[in-house]
Amino acid sequence: MSQTAQHNSMFEAVLARLDTAAKLMNLNPEVANILRNPARQVKVSLPVVMDNGSIRVFEGYRTVHSTHLGPSKGGIRYAMDVNADEVMALAAWMTFKCAVANLPYGGAKGGIQLDPRAHSVGELERITRAYALAMKDVFGVNRDIPAPDMGTSGREMAWILDELNKVNGEDAPGVITGKPISIGGSLGRDAATGRGVMINTLCALEKMGITAKGAKAVVQGFGNVGAHAARLLSEQGICVVGIGDHTASYYNANGIDITAAIAYTNSNNKVLKGFTGATEIPADQLLIQACDILVPAALQNVITSSNADAIKAKLIVEGANGPTTPEADPIINSKKIICVPDILANSGGVTVSYFEWVQNKAGYYWPESEVNSKHDLKMREAFEQVWAASQNYKTSLRIGAYIAALQKIEQGVRLKGAY
Ligand code: NAD
């Protein structure tokens, strides 16, 4: 589902938060208007030969939302519901996310409308290479730098890099991040978004006066973000009592052995269905189970005005992009639930993507311990800035995060000027 009940589009939902923050901080309306309009939107048609010899045409998108703080940065998503509106919303979130995390980047996002599970590896490779070629004038190491998102991984990044290297006649690994280590990826990138979720959780618990050890967490989504977040939270002594993916949801009040769950999915086509370390529950019950910390790390629009009131967690840490609809925000706030918003909570991924880009430019690679300690430092700094903005403006962490981002982007807009 990619639409909210009261907002016709995901991009409108982004603008709703932008407007709230802009009003509170008294943002120059001209700056707000620039940010309401993405800088560049590209849509391509990709005719690709399927394994059976037939030709299918796929829709590919790339939106560059802003380049005011640096080259644009953002992932590539493969899913059936990818569309121009969703890509635009995700691109705008990247602008705010990079600013929140103090990265020298603007925001972008891309995607292809397809079900990655419905294609062979060969078909996926041909579709991905066709997309990379079609976007050769958009992507660039100092222009627009893609990365993985839902439905893509290091494998697709390697194909895109290879295609761009061929067409540009040079090896420029920094043109894309989230690459496998052997071709210029960064140690620590795979787990980085989950690590950012863990650090943000610890920061918020400290402010709330809750001890991490023994606190109970529920994590929705068991892919890149969810599985690493669950593992890293449990390594901090947090008791993960609920997990779920698109195939099944599980609850165990005594805590789930996350190492065992990861080992199970690794041997079960990456899905949880059939896991025996907890009791299976209906999917719509997972988010409303008793817990202290709720980590939605799968889809957008899962916390809505229909279920927000039933949430029992004291803290929500948004691993996914856009898991909470604007209509659910006031319900969450009135219940005094602290919500670390997506543009802060899942910014660990783009932070380590930035480190990957820096290492590619320098041609010098850091040990994982260095990546992790630099990440943790940046994440704590970003959390403190957002916390301070929310306190100063007496608002939620979400609007505080938008204000912290807009203060930086406003400077970029003013200093770079207009025609
Ligand atoms: P992924 O494809 O690796 O995993 C997605 C997970 O969500 C899978 O476990 C899948 O089964 C689950 N899921 C799908 N539909 C579901 C449903 N209806 N109910 C419950 N679970 C469902 O994707 P990911 O990279 O982990 O991304 C997850 C979210 O995090 C997305 O919103 C993405 O935009 C965001 N995000 C990812 C990164 C990153 O570095 N990968 C960075 C920032 C934000």
Image (cartoon, helix red, strand yellow):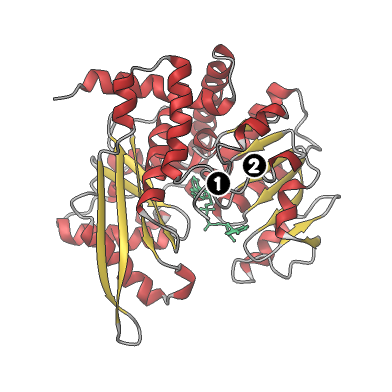
Regarding residue 185, the answer to whether it shows in the image is no
**Residue lying at 45% horizontally and 19% vertically, measured from the top left:** 23
Q: Is residue 302 positioned above or below 278 on the image?
A: above
Q: Quadrant of residue 260?
A: bottom right
**Residue lying at 56% horizontally and 38% vertically, measured from the top left:** 196
- Count neighbours of disc 1 (C-alpha within 10 A) and say few if under 14, some if 14 to 19, many if 20 or more: few
Work out how far the residue at label 2 is from the one at label 1, CA to CA, in angstroms.
Answer: 9 Å
Q: Secondary structure at mark 2?
A: loop
Residue 195 on image: x %, y %? 58, 41
Residue 20 on image: x %, y %? 48, 25
**Residue lying at 74% horizontally and 43% vertically, measured from the top left:** 217
Q: Is residue 299 left or right of residue 171?
A: right
Give the mark, 2 or 1, whose residue is nearer the N terminus.
1
Q: Which residue is mark 1?
A: 5
Q: 47 and 169: which one is in front? A: 47
Mark 2 residue's CB less than 8 Å from ligand 1: no
Find out whether the residues at labels 2 and 1 contact each other: C-beta distance under 8 Å: yes
Q: Which mark is on residue 337?
A: none
Residue 306 on image: x %, y %? 67, 45
Q: Is residue 327 left or right of residue 363?
A: right
Q: Residue furthest bottom?
A: 52
